[in-house]
Amino acid sequence: QEILIPSPWGQGRVSRAIRWLIAPIVWLHFKMLETIITLQCGLAKHGLIPTTAVKDDVACDLPMVTDGFYEALDAGEIVAAKGEIARFEPEAVVLTGGERVACDTVVFATGWHQTADSFFAEADRSAIVGPDGLYRLHRHVVSPDVTGLGFVGANQSFATTLTSELSAEWLVRYLDGQLSRQPTEDEMRRSIEDQAAWRRERPAAKAYGGRCIAPFHFRHVDELLEDLGAKLTPFNTSWLLPPDAAAISKHLESAPAYAVTDEKKDPASAVTDEKSDPLVRAVSTDENPAAPRKPLGRTV
């Protein structure tokens, strides 16, 4: 399904022409998916059919259904009502659609917003978070304008543990300048802007400040693996299956091994050493105090 959703990549004339030609097939695919979900969950009889299309709503803030929810609806244990609270009355609330719901107690289950803005100094915050609220991070991990800072796990996905572990493998090599495809600052900025432009046109993609990898999990994993130097086939068979950690691990094994080194790399991509940046910490490679030490950036 990733291939069927318009993406920040492949927006050339040929790609646009192909998408135009297969548009009816794509429409039929998602319409069938919506029909199946509607029938399986009984959305119509409970008045819960969404007003937006499935392909436009795939993002990390897509809610997951609690076990037994639809069964409780069918049994009348839960009564669904669409709308928001417009006003309170002594023994009821009135919704924006005009419906009056009698109640004794109102529980505000409004969720929460994930943010790390207060963690940054003002200069770093303006570099990392754009005026539109979108995080400007290459591969959802690093900013070209803030040296030695990396994010692992703050980027949401439908397989966060898997993508976070792979991001950690990517980050340590990036900080030491050991990626097989080490990006320049200009390359990172172009990639970031392509992602941001796509997200501005897709409201669901703005969730969590644009740090949501969905719906392009496989594309994201492949980009990280290619940067690491892993050997991928033109038609990666994992695209046809759910995310497979074992298969991805085999691909990672084909990448050049990470080697601890004291050699200084390009300052645009290498981590600052301990002496020049007190925020950079060093850890030994094993329990031997005399073992070589590798510098690590500030990792959130």
Image (cartoon, rainbow, N blue to C red):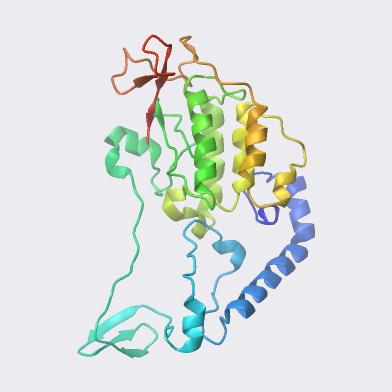
In the image, residue 230 sits, relative to residue 68, either above or below, namely above
Which residue: 52% across, 30% down? Answer: 169
Q: Is residue 8 visible?
A: no
* Foreground pick, 161 / 239: 161
The residue at the far left in this view is 90
Which residue: 50% across, 47% down? Answer: 160
In the image, residue 286 sits, relative to residue 80, either above or below, namely above
Q: Is residue 30 visible?
A: yes
Residue 197, image x, y percentages? 54, 47
Left or right, residue 240 beside residue 106:
right
The residue at the far front in this view is 287
Which residue: 26% across, 82% down? Answer: 87
Q: How many marks?
A: 0
Residue 291, image x, y percentages? 42, 11
Residue 132, image x, y percentages? 41, 49
Quarter assignment of residue 54? bottom right
Which residue: 66% across, 76% down? Answer: 35
Quadrant holding the N terminus? bottom right
In the image, residue 22 sits, relative to residue 254, either above or below, namely below
Quadrant holding the C terminus? top left
In the image, residue 140 sits, relative to residue 171, either above or below, namely below
Left or right, residue 266 beside residue 233:
left
Residue 72, image x, y percentages? 47, 82
